[in-house]
Image (spheres, rainbow, N blue to C red):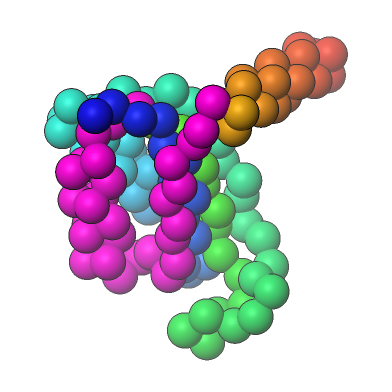
Amino acid sequence: MIKQYETVFIATPVLSEAQMKEAVAKYSNFIKDNGGEVVYEEDWGLKQLAYPIQHKTSGFYHLIEFKADTQLVAALETQYHRDERIIRFITVALDKDAVAYAEKRRANRQAKTQQEQ
């Protein structure tokens, strides 16, 4: 069954810009190559963590919203576990209200970026 999901992962802060982009591309391509559809991506950048994780106090946050089958989510999380660059992640299934909220958030963000230009 195809559902819409949202995954956020935190990458280690010692990565360069190129390494972070490569990690993001790896997971986006993994979703696409396994029958999923990436709906939206958002880079939240380097942020302070609420508590240290693996002796690190900050990390690169990235959000990927996608549509996929439930087996893909399990495979994606296995990939997160195997990658030493990823220090935390969470994947949640979106219900209809969450999908509507995500669409509204995207529209607001797009309007804000157009306004700044």
Relative image position of residue 99 (x, y in whole percent): 55, 26
> Quadrant of residue 2 in the image?
top left
- Left or right: 71, with 117 as reference point: left
Task: Examine the image and state in which quarter residue 39 appears.
Answer: top left
Most foreground residue, 3 or 43: 3
Closest to the observer, 108 or 43? 108
Is 33 displayed left or right of 91 in the figure?
left
Report x, y in % for residue 63.
Answer: 51, 42
- Please count the marks in the image: 0
User: In the rendered structure, which segment of residues is drawn in magenta?
Assistant: 67-96
Q: Residue at x 24, y 29 (%)?
A: 1
Q: State the residue lying farthest toward the bottom.
A: 55
Asked whether 52 falls inside the magenta stretch, the response is no
The residue at 52%/87% (across/down) is 55
- Examine the structure image and report whether residue 73 is included in the region drawn in magenta: yes
- For residue 16, say whether it is visible: no
Q: Is residue 109 left or right of residue 80?
A: right
Q: Is residue 59 above or below residue 76?
A: below
**x and y, in percent, of residue 29 in the image:** 25, 34
1 over 7 or under it: above or below: above
Q: Is residue 77 visible?
A: yes
Depicted 83 relative to depicted 34: above or below: below
Residue 19: percent from the left, percent from the top? 37, 52
Please state, as top left, top right, bottom left or bottom right, where the C terminus lies in the image: top right
Q: Residue at x 18, y 43 (%)?
A: 71
Q: Foreground: 95 or 81? A: 95
Which residue lies at the image location 69% right of the left edge and 74% below the top edge?
50
